[in-house]
């Protein structure tokens, strides 16, 4: 097997088949799933959240990438999907499945912080994304599908007049990378906390 193009593992395939059998398996770009798996692999002992239609399938990819000290929350809004995932992921203690409105869930867990949030929602989701970005740790990543740079600009403007808690989206706190083509996605990373540069010792000679 070509390690650079590693295919989905047994859990991913099992979850996909089960979701298809239940009639709730939305089309997921494999590039998104692979990117989510790679991002999870970069965060040892990380806390991960996957939201929206397809969260279970992408969550299975994330489980493949994350280590045994990490935890994953799969948040869905479809009762059929929640039932399938509750059964298929029951044997992995690192994963939990929740059936709840995304904005309500994020508000309920405001005291928590995440290293990776994968948002697969479609349509309007300003409140979900605004609260989600506020819950990222320094160095954490927010992968939003069906979202591009133009929508990010509109999103940033819309948060300025919103409730100040959480605060408006501040581009200075984040790095963004639009992922075009088939992905039509946006990767937003919270900047690592700045460190003061070391001062040269007065005894240093050139």
Image: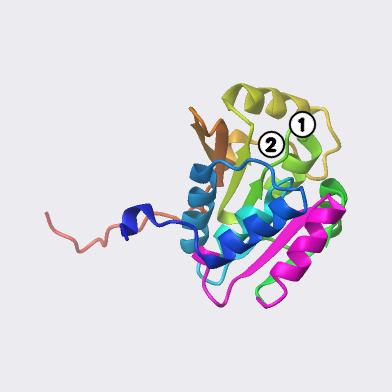
Q: Is residue 43 above or below residue 69?
A: above
Residue 192, percent across and down?
A: 51, 53
The label shown at residue 43 is none
Q: Position of residue 112 (x, y in %)?
A: 74, 63
Q: Which residues are magenta?
A: 64-92
Answer whether residue 68 is magenta in the image. yes
Q: Is residue 190 above or below residue 66?
A: above
Q: Could you tell me if residue 25 is visible in this image?
A: yes
Kindly identify the residue that appears in the image at 48 percent across and 27 percent down.
Answer: 181
- The image shows residue 160 at horizontal and vertical percentages of 77, 29
Determine crowd level at label 2: few under 14, some 14-19, many 20+ residues with C-alpha closer than 10 A.
many
Residues at discs 2 and 1 in contact (Cβ within 8 Å): yes
SS type, badge 2: loop
Could you say whether the residue bearing mark 1 is in a helix, strand or loop?
helix
Q: How is the image coloured?
A: rainbow
The residue under the point 69% across, 56% down is 56
Q: Say few, some or many: other residues with alpha carbon within 10 Å of mark 1 (under 14 / 14 to 19 / 20 or more).
A: some
**Looking at this rendering, what residue extends furthest in the left direction?**
206
Q: Earlier in the sequence, mark 2 or mark 1?
A: 1
Q: Which residue is mark 1?
A: 159
Task: Kindly identify the residue that appears in the image at 50 percent across and 55 percent down.
Answer: 39
Q: Between 21 and 60, which is closer to the camera in this rendering?
A: 21
- From the image, tell me which residue sits under label 2: 169
């Amino acid at each position: 097997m070509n390690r650079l193009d590693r295919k989905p593992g047994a859990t991913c395939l099992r979850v996909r088949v089960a979701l298809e059998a239940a009639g709730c398996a939305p089309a997921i770009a494999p590039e998104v799933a692979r990117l989510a798996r790679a991002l999870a692999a970069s965060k040892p002992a990380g806390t991960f959240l996957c939201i929206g239609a397809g969260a279970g399938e992408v969550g299975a990819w994330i489980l493949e990438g994350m280590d045994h000290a990490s935890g994953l929350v799969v948040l869905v809004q479809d009762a059929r999907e929640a039932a399938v995932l509750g059964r298929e992921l029951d044997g992995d203690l690192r994963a939990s499945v929740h059936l709840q409105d995304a904005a309500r869930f994020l508000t309920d867990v405001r005291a928590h912080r995440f290293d990776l949030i994968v948002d697969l929602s479609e349509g309007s989701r300003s409140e979900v994304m605004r609260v989600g970005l506020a819950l990222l740790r320094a160095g954490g990543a927010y992968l939003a599908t069906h979202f591009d740079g133009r929508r990010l600009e509109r999103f940033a403007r819309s948060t300025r007049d919103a409730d100040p808690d959480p605060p408006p989206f501040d581009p200075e706190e984040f790095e963004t990378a639009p992922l075009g083509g088939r992905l039509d996605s946006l990767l937003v990373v919270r900047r690592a906390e700045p460190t003061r540069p070391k001062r040269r010792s007065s005894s240093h000679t050139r």
